[in-house]
Image (tube, grey):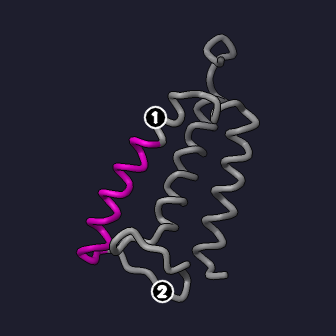
Amino acid sequence: MPEYTATTIVVLALTLLVAGRRGLLRRRSTWLAAGIFSAVTIVADLVLTGLPIVTYDPAQLSGLMIGPMPIEDLGYGVALFLLAAIAWDAAAPRSRRR
């Protein structure tokens, strides 16, 4: 399996697991924010990979693309979003948690 693809799958799986255990995946706000974040990520990544300001070694990718953007970029971005949500939730006072 290509390196960037494998890393994305592992990081995304781990963040989904932790977010699920913390109850974040049951919150509508998490899904709404993830959708907005994903849309912004796609637009920015399409610009960056389309110009091409950012390029990748095709041997390190799965080959699944959204235009010039590798699908791994979206998976990795969602994983980073979830990591930030996990950190935010962990830092919240207990009274604010649901």
Residue at 67% x, 49% y is 15
Name the residue at 71% across, 53% down: 14
Q: Is residue 73 left or right of residue 67?
A: right
Mark 1 Cα-neighbour bin, 10 Å: few <14, some 14–19, many ≥20? few
The residue lying at 31 percent from left, 65 percent from top is 46
The image's mark for residue 32 is 1
**Which residues are the magenta region?**
35-53
Which amino acid does the dot numbered 2 rest on? Pro
Estimate the x, y position of residue 75 in percent, counting from the top left.
54, 59
- Residue at (47%, 65%) from the top-left corner? 73
Q: Nearer the viewer, mark 1 or mark 2?
A: 1
Q: Quadrant of residue 91?
A: top right
Say which of 40 and 89 sits in front. 40
Front position in the image: 31 or 94:
31
The residue under label 2 is 58
Looking at the figure, which quarter contains the C terminus? top right
Horizontally, residue 15 falls left or right of residue 61, namely right
Q: Looking at the picture, does residue 90 appear above or below residue 84?
A: above
In space, the residues marked 1 and 2 are separated at their CA atoms by 32 Å
Q: Position of residue 84 (x, y in %)?
A: 56, 41
Query: Which amino acid type is shown beneath numbered disc 1?
Result: Leu
Check residue 16 in the rendering and tell me which mark sits there, or answer none.
Answer: none
**Residue 27 point in image, percent of width and height:** 59, 28
